[in-house]
Image: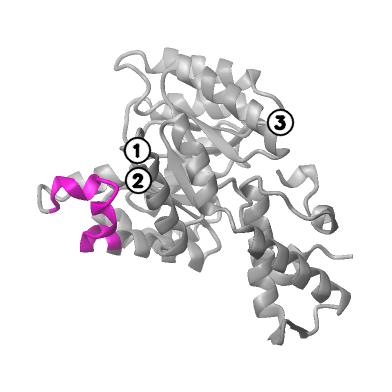
Amino acid sequence: MKHPREVLLGAQAATAYLPVCDHYSGVEARMRKSLQLQAEMIEEFGACVFDVTLDCEDGAPVGAEAEHAAMVVALATLASDKARVAVRVHAVDHPAFESDMAVIAGNLSGRLSHIMIPKVESLADVLKAEQALLAASAGDVPLHVLIESPLAIHNAFEIAAHPSVQSLSFGLMDFVSSHGGAIPFDAMGSQGQFTHPLVLRAKLEMASACHAYGKVPSHCVVTEFNDPAAMTAAARRAARELGYARMWSIHPNQIRPILEAFAPSEGEIEDAVKIITAAEQAGWAPISFSGKLHDRASYRYFWQVLERAHQTGRAIPAEAHIYFKPALC
């Protein structure tokens, strides 16, 4: 029996199966707490529902980049086999980039879920990161790239097309500040980032580039981390209006609102299970469900509902458990 992903997604069946939340920590104490929280939530949900990304770019003190990278390696080595741990290194033009990649990718190639490359402007930056991975004998580690400028948005389709790139993230604050004051500060806020035309256009362009090449678009941060309503509203708009499949968290309080916003409803999950089960029994031929015709186009949609339910730790009816083995978590 072929898996529904293989039957319905075709060439895109190899598209990254990523948790919907990417949680960032840059200070050692917070890194340790993030890894512990991840372990606790794996036990709670039975799946890894968020990545932990250990941050070298903003986390490393100036002049102590090497020591910070070594600490990150030590922490990542302690993570369990079920954990998903990533690292954000310095930008490709930073003096610490090559040593970051040599130390982190060279020592953690078998443990990293991905490496995040910030301030990617063009395909040339991706190629430089790829070469650094190969030099560290870590060519299988996926690259995630951070799109933070008008030029990067212009090149987003070319960047997303590269086979080593698994996901693109939108860097809101740097994108706004890169406009030299032409975009007001309130466009960095939880409301302004969804209304300013240049910011909104950039988000849509990046998401479109990702979907064109089967990559995962990841939405930017919400800086109001003590405002759960703002966090939930922003995550819901990113997921339902802008086509994003993943979002950054910068505080533990943001993780569950992201999971909630990106999760399908109980009714959507129940319908998806019924439709996928009936479709499989029909050999994926067209069926009638609740008086409506369904075929592979709608099967594909409802299968993705089930994937999103699993990614967000939602309860899935027993008849669909066979589709979600531990290896997919």
> Label 2, label 1: how many angstroms apart (C-alpha)?
5 Å
Q: Say which quarter of the image contains residue 223.
A: top left
Residue 10 in sight in this render: no
| Mark 1 crowdedness (10 Å alpha carbons): few <14, some 14-19, many ≥20 | few
Q: Residue 230, labelled with which disc? A: 2
Circles 2, 1 touching at the beta carbon (< 8 Å): yes
- The stretch drawn in magenta includes residue 22: no
Residue designated by label 1: 227
Q: Position of residue 217 (x, y in %)?
A: 47, 55
- Mark 2: which amino acid? Ala
- Left or right: 179 in relation to 115: left
Q: Secondary structure at mark 2?
A: helix
As measured in the structure, the alpha-carbon distance from the residue carrying label 1 to the one carrying label 3 is: 27 Å
Q: Residue at x 38, y 18 (%)?
A: 65
Residue 251 appears in view: yes
Q: What is the spatial separation of the Cα atoms under label 3 and label 2, in whole angstroms?
A: 28 Å
- Residue behind mark 3: 43
